[in-house]
Image (spheres, rainbow, N blue to C red):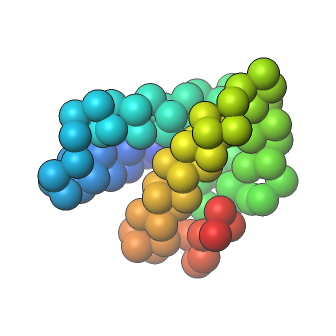
Amino acid sequence: MRRWDRLLDSYIEEYGARGVSKESVAMNRARIERWGRWLKARRPRVGIEHIDVESITRYIESCSTFKAKATVYGTLSSMRMFGDYLVRQGLWAKNPLR
């Protein structure tokens, strides 16, 4: 999923260009990288176009154990913004995180 990494880099570049703080950019990058690592570990691998609600739900379940509600909501927010980016890029027809 090298394509995931390229998309992440271009998304973070676009996100940072909005004038957001460096800390916010770094946090969003870390959250999306963590999601990407989780997806890459799945067998069989899921293509970006085929990420569905069930896999998103499984990821949220796996990363939300013993986490504060604000942390989980922050992760969902980062994922939702990246999902919007994937819709703009034409990889998703609609964002399942909306």
Q: How many marks?
A: 0
Residue 83 in view here:
yes
Q: Is residue 6 left or right of residue 42?
A: left
Spot occupied by residue 16 in the image (x, y as percentages of width and height): 21, 47
The quadrant of the image that shows the C terminus is bottom right
What residue sits 80% from the left and 48% below the top? 57
Quadrant for residue 43, please give it. Answer: top right
Q: Residue at the location (49% across, 39% down)? A: 32
Quadrant assignment, res 25: top left
Q: Position of residue 61 (x, y in %)?
A: 81, 37
Residue at the extreme top of the image, as rendered: 66
Residue at 83% across, 53% down: 54
Give percent across and percent down for residue 97.
65, 63
Which residue is at the far bottom? 93
* Whether residue 76 is situated above or below residue 1 in the rendered picture: below
Q: Is residue 12 left or right of residue 42?
A: left
Relative to 4, say whether 96 is above or below: below
Residue situated in front as seen by the camera: 32 or 5: 32
At horizontal 69% and vertical 46% (from top left) the residue drawn is 46
- Can I make out residue 13 in this image? no
